[in-house]
Image (cartoon, rainbow, N blue to C red):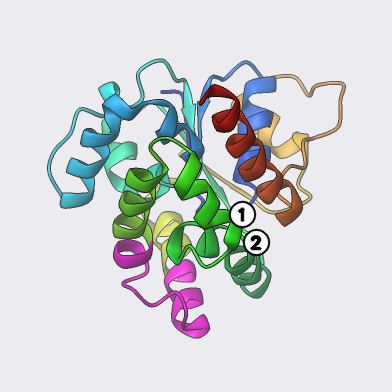
Amino acid sequence: MKVIGVGVGRTGTLSLKAALETLGLGPCFHGRHVLDHPDRLALWEAAARGDAVDWSAVFAGYESSVDWPGAAFWRELTAAFPAAKIILTVREPDGWYDSVARTIYPMFGTSSDPRAREALRVVPGMEVFTRFHRRMIWDGFFGGGFADRERAIAVYEEHNAAVRAEVPAERLLVCEPGSGWAPLCAFLGVPVPDQEYPHLNDPGRFWGRVEARMAESRRRS
């Protein structure tokens, strides 16, 4: 593991995943890849219980990681991969909360969106993944309080502050929206690509990916 993204979901993590892969630091593990490795779900569940796990086995085949669930175990990952560089993606707290409330919370936190309920019905493994997601993020990371806007934002800001305080400055890059290639490439010591930095995290794209996954599952059934 060469790069560990410790920013929580909806802070530009999917864009960072695409950027890292463009820079040759992929494959990059993202939360949606949990469903691609059902054989590793037991390891994630063990980690959620607080058990010791072999993180090299969890991320076998990947050179980088971003988003949840990895971000929820950032202390364990930074210790397990001491040579990896750490990237914290952040955004303005109210905008972050609104984005989560329109996407991953109604998808995995409450399944209140009709598309979420349909995905639970047609996508293999989605029920198990959603149950794990709720236990680890909504009940664990947010302590069951994401619906309380002030409480959720406080948890988000405490996470970012802890990363900044505990990760040595020379090992850490903090990325804000619009930062582009320059700080990332300087941090990683690689040339700046001759292409636009990826922008993949708007809510419409999120639900588009959910619908694409459902369509793929229907074709296979």
Residue 204 within the magenta-colored segment of the rendering: no
Identify the mark nearer the N-term, 2 or 1: 1
**Would you say 22 lies left or right of 74 here?**
right
Query: Magenta stretch?
Result: 138-157
- Of 147 and 208, which appears nearest the observer? 208
- Of 177 and 62, which appears nearest the observer? 62
- Looking at the rendered structure, the kind of residue marked 1 is Thr
Residue drawn at 44 percent across, 74 percent down: 146
Q: Which residue is mark 2?
A: 91
Q: Which residue is mark 1?
A: 11
Q: Main secondary structure of the magenta part?
A: helix
- Of 142 and 85, which appears nearest the observer? 142
User: Residue 192's spot in the image, x, y percent?
Assistant: 78, 24
Q: Is residue 187 above or below residue 114?
A: above
SS label for mark 1: loop
- Of 212 and 97, which appears nearest the observer? 212
User: Residue 183's spot in the image, x, y percent?
Assistant: 71, 38
Q: Is residue 84 above or below residue 123?
A: above
SS label for mark 2: loop
User: Residue 199's spot in the image, x, y percent?
Assistant: 77, 42
Using the rendered image of the protein, determine whether residue 73 is visible from the camera's viewpoint. yes
**Looking at the image, which residue sits at the far left?**
51
